[in-house]
């Protein structure tokens, strides 16, 4: 996708590419790092993103240094570009352990990374530090900085707005309530996996049509809430 992204950037600006922020470490959000570095970008990411990109990858290889973040942060940082402050802030243990949201203060645009899947069930990567409760808190954090006019760029899905974002939070909280009740009643993983009533309301609205279907989201919530 790197060439397509660079072509799209050139369609509205002939200025050089200077910064790129990885919202987390997954390959669909960081796989073009090396290409973007060669195009002139300085890569910025949370500390944990750099740690994961520095480590041995699933295929046994290591990323080249050009693919690694140059600037990292622990909690938050501000970048000023074209007289606009962009607030970059970490949300802990949400989609992964290294998620960042970006808020463009003058343009009134929020980029959520994969802490928001518009109209779909989210992928919560438990094996990479993600948690249900942290994910819900990340959405609440995002809602705190926006207003009714904010344009929201989700990690997956169409351009969004506050109303859609609030609907997404309502879905997450409803699923947490339903599945936590099952856990409190001693239900097993297999019982929760098979109980389609737990997600039916949102299945009917099409939330399970993406990468994460209704069965997967029930299992994710069950495993995460049991651990938490």
Image (cartoon, helix red, strand yellow):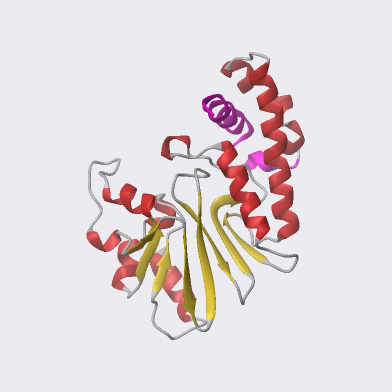
Q: Compared to 212, does 114 lie above or below?
A: below
Q: Compared to 22, does 196 lie above or below?
A: above
At horizontal 40% and vertical 72% (from top left) the residue drawn is 19
Asked if residue 176 lies in the magenta stretch, the reply is no
At horizontal 27% and vertical 41% (from top left) the residue drawn is 59
Determine if residue 210 is in view: no
At horizontal 71% and vertical 41% (from top left) the residue drawn is 171
Rendering coords of residue 219 (x, y %): 57, 27
Q: Where is residue 67, by image quadrant?
A: bottom left
Q: Residue pushed farthest bottom?
A: 14
Rendering coords of residue 183 (x, y %): 63, 20
Q: Compared to 159, does 48 lie above or below?
A: above
For the C terminus, the image quarter is top right
Determine if residue 43 is in view: yes
At horizontal 50% and vertical 81% (from top left) the residue drawn is 11
What is the total number of numbered labels drawn onto the structure image?
0
Rendering coords of residue 104 (x, y %): 57, 71
Q: Main secondary structure of the magenta part?
A: helix
Asked if residue 225 lies in the magenta stretch, the reply is yes
For the N terminus, the image quarter is bottom left
Q: Where is residue 212, by image quadrant?
A: top right
Q: Please tell me which residue lies in front, 145 or 13.
A: 145
Q: Which residues are magenta?
A: 205-228
Query: Is residue 169 found left or right of 193 in the rendered image?
Result: right
């Amino acid at each position: 996708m790197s060439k397509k992204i660079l072509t799209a950037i050139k369609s509205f600006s002939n200025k050089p590419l200077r910064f790129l922020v990885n919202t987390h470490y997954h390959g669909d959000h960081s796989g073009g790092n090396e290409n973007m570095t060669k195009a002139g970008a300085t890569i910025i990411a949370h500390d944990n993103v750099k740690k994961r990109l520095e480590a041995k990858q699933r295929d046994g290889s290591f990323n080249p240094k050009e693919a690694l973040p140059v600037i990292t942060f622990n909690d938050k940082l501000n970048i000023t570009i074209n007289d606009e402050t962009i607030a970059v802030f970490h949300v802990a243990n949400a989609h992964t352990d290294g998620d960042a949201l970006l808020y463009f203060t003058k343009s009134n645009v929020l980029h959520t990374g994969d802490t928001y899947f518009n109209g779909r069930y989210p992928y919560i990567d438990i094996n990479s530090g993600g948690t249900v409760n942290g994910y819900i808190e990340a959405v609440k954090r995002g809602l705190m900085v926006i207003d009714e006019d904010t344009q929201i760029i989700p990690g997956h899905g169409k351009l969004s707005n506050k109303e859609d974002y609030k609907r997404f939070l309502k879905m997450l909280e409803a699923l947490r309530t339903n599945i936590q009740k099952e856990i409190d009643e001693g239900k097993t993983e297999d019982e929760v996996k098979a109980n389609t009533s737990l997600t039916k309301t949102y299945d009917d609205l099409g939330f399970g049509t993406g990468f994460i279907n209704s069965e997967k989201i029930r299992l994710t919530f069950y495993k995460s809430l049991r651990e938490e």
